Amino acid sequence: MVLTPEEWVRQHFVEFLIKEKKYPVSLIAIEKQLTINNRKKRTDILIFNSNGKPNIIVECKAPSIKITQATFDQIARYNLKLDADFLVITNGLEHYYCSLDKENETYVFLKDIPSYN
């Protein structure tokens, strides 16, 4: 595997999830495939809860890539299919954490994601 700038960000974020947030490796999926409008897509990182339900979707970008509304739209499309509790967007320099307020159909930005309990 080639260590692209995006892959570097992904590997470091996975390490953060395991070492700092204490998520078990067995609940973390890398490049999990999903189909949206008959097109195959892949999540960068998908963390499941202990019941096997998607809990956190992480979208990684290279450090040189600016995080834009298009990035949020991309992860929101993934979440329409996966229905995760938390979304994370990172380019290794900036990190955005949010949860979905389903009642009001808006995102609530958070300081961090919860640790595994």
Image: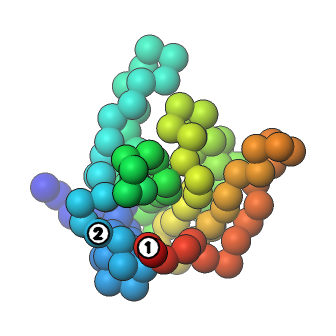
Of 51 and 39, the residue lying toward us: 51
Q: Is residue 84 above or below residue 97?
A: above
Residue at 25% over, 66% down: 25
- Kindly tell me whether residue 64 is visible in this rendering: no
User: Crowding at label 2, few (<14), some or many (≥20) Cα neighbours within 10 Å?
Assistant: some
Q: What x and y, as percent, mark residue 101?
A: 77, 51
By what rule are the colours in the image chosen?
rainbow
Residue labelled with disc 2: 24
Q: What x and y, as percent, mark residue 58?
A: 47, 57
Of 117 and 90, the residue lying toward us: 117
Q: Pick the quarter of the image with the C terminus.
A: bottom left
Instruction: List the single residue furthest toward the front.
Output: 51
Q: Do the residues labelled 2 and 1 touch (CB within 8 Å)?
A: yes
Q: What x and y, as percent, mark residue 88?
A: 55, 61
Q: How far apart are marks 2 and 1 (CA)?
A: 8 Å
Residue at 32% over, 42% down: 32
Whichever of labels 2 and 1 marks the residue nearer the N terminus, that label is 2
Q: Is mark 2 on a helix, strand or loop?
A: loop
Which disc number belongs to residue 116?
1
Q: What x and y, as percent, mark residue 89?
A: 55, 60
Q: In this view, does 38 lie to the left or right of 77?
A: left
Residue at 57% over, 40% down: 83
Q: Quadrant of residue 70?
A: top right
Q: Is residue 9 left or right of residue 59?
A: left
Amino acid at pointer 1: Tyr
Q: In this view, does 56 lie above or below 77?
A: below
